[in-house]
Amino acid sequence: MSKILVWFSVALILSLGLWFLDRINASSISFSDVETEFEDGGGVHLTETTFTQDSIDPDMQMMLATTSRGARWAYWWKDFSPQEKLRYENVSRPAGPFRVGIQAGHWKNAEVPDELAGLKRSGGGATGGGKSEVDIVLEIAQKVKKSLESRGVVVDLLPATVPVDYFADAFISIHADGNSSPSVSGFKIAAPQKDFSKKSSLLLELINKSYKKETGLGEDRNITRRMSGYYAFNWRRYEHALHPMTPAVIVETGFITSPVDRRIIVDNQSRVVNGIVNGLLEFLEKA
Ligand SMILES: [Zn+2]
């Protein structure tokens, strides 16, 4: 009996020791700041025990975390460093008409640079109703471009790969969602987790309002880290990402797997286009 007690005590002391070491390692950053991982553009929530001190790079504000899905890079967002401030903060828009980037999600995924190689696995994105996400969102993006150009806005139609340090008056990434249940429905819009431009929340608010009005779709409240930590927003991790001062949102236009949503995003795209364009034009006037 006493032998068992001794082993039990040893085990207890060992686990307490490990727990304590973890606490020390964990003390260097704030967990509420740690948001996402990138290897495949997905997101995981990190807990205090999922990483170790030696894998943290405080300058890059990233760390290698061990998660249930294996080792992943994660990052947290601090304000600009003095060098970043010099490089990014005092950018001013060139004279001339408004310029915006409209990204068709997953478009040309096969051509992404090495740093975004994980995207290749997602192919054309979600599928449903015999359609592929990339086909639907490319159609929508092309129509958005045409509509904006008729109003004098210069539009860059962008594939999955964003130009290095892409700077514009606004950036909108267009996607469609998928779910195993056909009854899951609705749109959702997210801004970068840390908005250095300080204008993305206005862009989000205005497009959200007009999108709801034009499409009549309900709002899906489940914003994921895959959205707020979208790879194109992550200029600290990737070269092919937005300039931090570009106001940006990612729009999940609806669920391709929902017959209700497909009636809008496949069969009635002019309503989707008006929802995005009207909100964006209002933003360009106000911002
Ligand atoms: Zn997508």
Image (cartoon, helix red, strand yellow):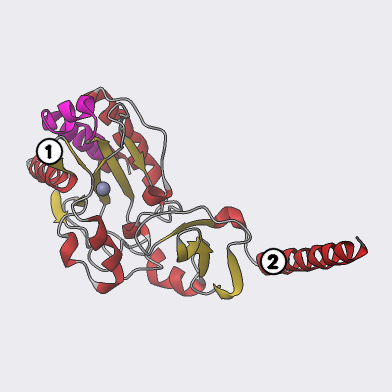
Up the image or down, 157 lies above or below 23; here it is above
**Residue 176 appears in which quarter of the rendering?**
top left
Q: Residues within 10 Å of mark 1 (few under 14, many from 20)?
A: few
Mark with earlier residue (2, 1): 2
Tell me the residue at 22%/38% (across/down): 281
- Which residue in the protein does label 1 denote? 130
269 vs 231, left or right, is left
Q: Is residue 240 visible?
A: no
The x and y percentages for residue 214 are 22, 25
**Residue 159 appears in which quarter of the rendering?**
bottom left
The x and y percentages for residue 103 are 20, 52
The x and y percentages for residue 2 are 92, 63
Tell me the residue at 15%/59% (across/down): 108
Up the image or down, 237 lies above or below 158; here it is below
Magenta range is 257-282
- The answer to the question of whether label 2 and label 1 lie on touching residues, with beta carbons closer than 8 A, is no
* Number of marks present in the image shown: 2
Up the image or down, 201 lies above or below 257; here it is below
79 vs 100, left or right, is right
What is the residue that sits farthest to the front in this orientation?
1
- Which residue in the protein does label 2 denote? 22
Which quadrant, please, contains the C terminus?
Answer: top left
Residue 65 is covered by the magenta coloring: no
Mark whose residue sits in front, 2 or 1:
1
What is the residue that sits farthest to the bottom in this orientation?
54
